[in-house]
Image: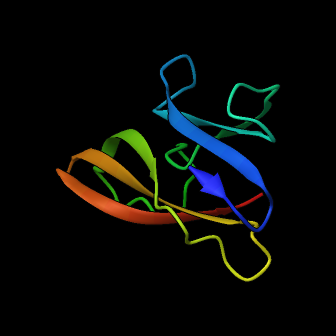
Amino acid sequence: VYNATLKQYLLMFTDYSLNNGGLKLYTADQPQGPFTEYALNPCAKDATWLQAGWSGCYGGYIIPETFGPDGRDVYFTLSLWRPYTVVLMKTKL
C-alpha cells in the first residue's frame, strides 16, 4: 500500500515465528526496498483489547488511504479464529 503523505510503501503480514500471531510491518521509499521492519503483536497475552477466550490472530490487511493527518496512523484489519471475526486496529509509525 502506498502512503502518499509519507511517500512510502507499506507491507504487512502475519509472522508465525512471533508468538500468538504477531505481525510484521515493513516500510520503504521504493517498492523494492530497502525496508524498515516493525514487529507488532496486537494479540499478545497481555493485550487489553482481547476478551477471555479470544485467540488465533492472523491477517494484518492495511486499509489504503487511511493514514491520518500526519500520515503515521496505519489502520488495518485483524482476523480472529475465536470468535471467528474481524476487528479494526490502528498502530502509529
Q: Quadrant of residue 18?
A: top right
Vertical relation: 36 (above or below) 53: above
Q: How many marks?
A: 0
Task: Give 16 or 65, whichever is nearer the viewer.
Answer: 65
Q: Residue furthest bottom?
A: 69
Q: Residue at x 28, y 50 (%)?
A: 53
Q: Position of residue 21 (x, y in %)?
A: 46, 33
Colour mapping: rainbow
Q: Residue furthest left?
A: 84
Task: Give 46 or 83, whichever is nearer the viewer.
Answer: 83
* Left or right relative to 70: residue 87: left
Task: Give 73 or 7, whichever is nearer the viewer.
Answer: 7
Q: Position of residue 37 (x, y in %)?
A: 76, 32
Q: Residue at x 76, y 36 (%)?
A: 30
Vertical relation: 65 (above or below) 11: below
Q: Residue at x 50, y 34 (%)?
A: 13
Q: Quadrant of residue 74?
A: bottom right
Q: Position of residue 4 (x, y in %)?
A: 71, 63
Q: Residue at x 55, y 16 (%)?
A: 17
* Left or right relative to 4: residue 88: left
* Left or right relative to 29: residue 31: left
Q: Quadrant of the C terminus?
A: bottom right
Q: Residue furthest top?
A: 17
Q: Position of residue 27 (x, y in %)?
A: 74, 41
